[in-house]
Image (cartoon, helix red, strand yellow):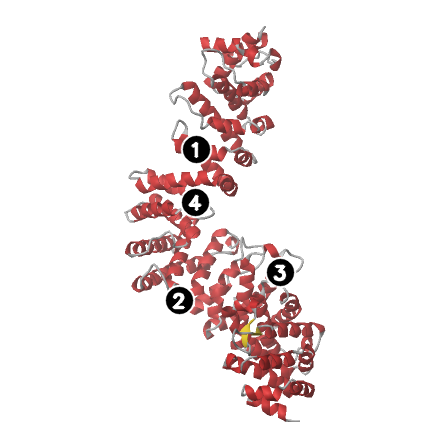
Amino acid sequence: MSCCDLAAAGQLGKAGIMASDCEPALNQAEGRNPTLERYLGALREAKNDSEQFAALLLVTKAVKAGDIDAKTRRRIFDAVGFTFPNRLLTTKEAPDGCPDHVLRALGVALLACFCSDPELATHPQVLNKIPILSTFLTARGDPDDAARRSMIDDTYQCLTAVAGTPRGPRHLIAGGTVSALCQAYLGHGYGFDQALALLVGLLAAAETQCWKEAEPDLLAVLRGLSEDFQKAEDASKFELCQLLPLFLPPTTVPPECLRDLQAGLARILGSKLSSWQRNPALKLAARLAHACGSDWIPAGSSGSKFLALLVNLACVEVRLALEETGTEVKEDVVTACYALMELGIQECTRCEQSLLKEPQKVQLVSIMKEAIGAVIHYLQQVGPEKQKEPFVFASVRILGAWLAEETSSLRKEQVANLAISPTTPGPAWPGDALRLLLPGWCHLTVEDGPREILIKEGAPSLLCKYFLQQWELTSPGHDTSVLPDSVEIGLQTCCHIFLNLVVTAPGLIKRDACFTSLMNTLMTSLPALVQQQGRLLLAANVATLGLLMARLLSTSPALQGTPASRGFFAAAILFLSQSHVARATPGSDQAVLALSPDYEGIWADLQELWFLGMQAFTGCVPLLPWLAPAALRSRWPQELLQLLGSVSPNSVKPEMVAAYQGVLVELARANRLCREAMRLQAGEETASHYRMAALEQCLSEP
């Protein structure tokens, strides 16, 4: 034993470490390590603190010198327990002539031995050491000191063992380990490579929590890695490609990092590479595309060439992977290529501030068309047993992104057939697959050939089932405050598709029973929907679709003045009537017609639905005899005339005048009491002011 060890032994009494802290319970047995057994025997026979400590030093050294099996490790723990290493870690009085970290190093060595046992790695006495262990990673000291290096290695062993337990990452994050690891890596001292490895593991296990607890430190690591990546000339750049995606933050990536990452990727992808070199670069580019769109790609010639190269390489990879039937698909790589293709689709369809020039767009559309053809080929080969797999869902997603922007370049019949086959709403899918195809269906239902195929293959019935299923998520029994935006967007897109079918295939609405169920849902849902804050656009879609369908289904018993039908039309009137108000103007005695505050911000998206709704309501009045009296009881015609009479006619656009006149004329023609109420509201005079000849004539009749 060294003089330092003996001095440490003599100092134990001052540190408060007594013989009673260790209760030897070790017995000799055949086959055990004779050296270790000799040390354990010395520990058992120790007569005072110094002898006991000396024996423990020897036990610790024997533990570190060779492998210890689980049974022996447990025997050592039973003999030593946590009390001894606890005091070693916390004592502040090192023996004379001994570095102050010797006692701590011994304590960490014992903990490292114990942590090799998964049960002990989750023990509260280990978990409560995480903060102090974390401080050891960044403590200053002689980098060549063997004891200090040994302590750092043991510390990483302890922390890694904890990280390998189910709840370990959470405990490490709460104990400040992430920040300590970041600082240890950035300091590039002894063990910094172990810090990075453990940091990668924690990010993989609990990314969100890591960033929440240590965002500034993680960003500093990202800056360092990005700079290294940009400068790397050797194979390390390919290793960094694999690491960097884990260090991209869930929020904004610093601009300097984006510059370095793009520059590094441009150098890699611009060279001839093998697949093992290229694939990590494509996956890193895909992560950047997902996190930042195209903002990480510089404007100008270099940026446009880089983007074109990215999309080109992605399309080639997709074709190579999917066109050969029977070959194993590298799903993670192809999924990354899908993300880069989506980026290409977005830039090709962007009219303003696109990174691509028109010739580049034309070329990329042609290349992407071929890649989408490979996706279609793959999906046509997929059997029912694979339709639940995430990669199939990803393939449907890229097809949906393509269909949302481009259908004319592919055979429409093939696309329409495929759009039906992989879509079955329900829990079988790992995600909402049908929603991804809805924008494409909007295009297909406008065109005669694809629409007929969709109808023939049962798409309308499938879409109705999907709509009703998604609508359930918005019902009062669900928490709509946490409802994903995608659900509401999906419902709106469904309404657009139904509107296309109402206009282009009215006979289908009348004969397919699924639309009767859909109409019932619209009628019962709209009254509550129009009252909900922030959901006006969805209410507009539901109201307009319901009014157009009611015109086609006017003979249905459900529309003959039932409570549900009356509630629906009352809600539709509320939506149509509250769009405009009279607004005073400074310096003028007469108000002007203006949008209501709730409608003003979304009128660009709303106005087409509003005008279509007004037209549809007008068409319903003569078909439903009870509707005109109901409208009169709501006072809509009177209030509409009052509104027109209170504003300057010059402030009312011609299309608004036409929409208002259409409703007023049909109500006046359908019901004598409506005509009388309009006359009492100065209807003839208002009609004359606005040159509503049809209304003026109607009100002049008995």
Name the residue that disc number 3 marks: 474
Callout 2 secondary element: loop
Mark 3 or mark 1: name the one nearer the start of the chain: 1
- Give the distance between the C-alpha atoms of the residues marked 2 and 1, in whole angstroms: 54 Å
User: Foreground: 535 or 687?
Assistant: 687
Callout 4 secondary element: loop
Q: Is residue 283 above or below residue 512?
A: above
Few, some or many residues within 10 Å of mark 2 (<14, 14–19, 20+): some
Q: Nearer the viewer, mark 2 or mark 4?
A: 4
Report the number of discs. Answer: 4
User: Foreground: 385 or 157?
Assistant: 157
The amino acid on which the numbered mark 3 sits, given as a three-letter code, is: Thr
Q: Residue 183 bears which disc, if any? A: 1
Q: Position of residue 334 (x, y in %)?
A: 41, 51
Q: Residue 410 bears which disc, if any? A: 2
Using the rendered image of the protein, determine whether residue 68 is visible from the camera's viewpoint: no
Using the rendered image of the protein, determine whether residue 469 is visible from the camera's viewpoint: yes
Name the residue that disc number 4 marks: 248
Residue drawn where x is 65% and y is 81% of the image: 638
Few, some or many residues within 10 Å of mark 3 (<14, 14–19, 20+): some
- Give the distance between the C-alpha atoms of the residues marked 2 and 4, in whole angstroms: 37 Å
Callout 1 secondary element: helix
User: Foreground: 367 or 12?
Assistant: 12
- Give the distance between the C-alpha atoms of the residues marked 4 and 1, in whole angstroms: 18 Å
Q: Quadrant of residue 79?
A: top right
Q: Residue 418 bears which disc, if any? A: none
Mark 2 or mark 1: name the one nearer the start of the chain: 1
Mark 3 or mark 4: name the one nearer the start of the chain: 4
- Give the distance between the C-alpha atoms of the residues marked 3 and 1, in whole angstroms: 47 Å
- Give the distance between the C-alpha atoms of the residues marked 3 and 4, in whole angstroms: 34 Å
